[in-house]
Image (spheres, rainbow, N blue to C red):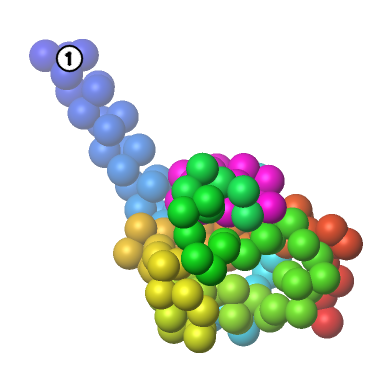
Amino acid sequence: MRLLRAASCVLVATVAAACADSEEAPAPESFGGGDARAGAAHYRIYCATCHGETGCGDGPLSASLDPKPAKHCDGEYMNALSDDHLFTVVKEGGQAAGKSAQMAAWGGSLSDAQIIDVIAFMRSVADPPYQAP
């Protein structure tokens, strides 16, 4: 019984910590840069199947897509896009930003803070590197 109670307390503490961590981030206008390392983990789960592990548009599903997925490693392309634009695409899907409807909306799976982390990861793989305005 004591072990069960201790496990229950650990579970409650873990859930409480997760809930505290999942608070929504500030509005996109106030991006603080995000955590690229955390973003990489989410990117692998939600983005890499189309955009590839390194963001070069060469994921396993990319061959079957038309248009092809964006190449996040292409700094010439990515550096021209605002964080707000990227946030909209990731959260609401490609169609919300005038892009392909095949680009899924991840706002139901990722919190705003996690989306900002994904954007930080995308920025980290761009070559040439992103220079914030």
Residue 7 in the magenta stretch? The answer is no
Residue 46 in the magenta stretch? The answer is yes
Identify the magenta region.
41-56
Image location (x, y in percent) of residue 112:
47, 67
> Circle 1 sits on which residue?
2
Please tell me which residue lies in front, 46 or 38: 46
Mark 1: give few (<14), some (14-19) or many (20+) Cα within 10 Å: few
Against 133, residue 130 (above or below) is: above
Q: Split into 4 quadrants, where in the image is the N terminus?
A: top left
Please tell me which residue lies in front, 47 or 99: 99
Q: Is residue 103 left or right of residue 129?
A: left
Q: Is residue 127 left or right of residue 15?
A: right
Image location (x, y in percent) of residue 46:
46, 51
Please tell me which residue lies in front, 72 or 35: 72
**Residue at the location (68% across, 60% down)?**
72
Name which quarter of the figure residue 34 lies in: bottom right
Q: Split into 4 quadrants, where in the image is the C terminus?
A: bottom right
Against 2, residue 65 (above or below) is: below
**Residue at the location (41% across, 67% down)?**
102
The secondary structure type at the circle numbered 1 is: helix
Amino acid, disc 1 = Arg
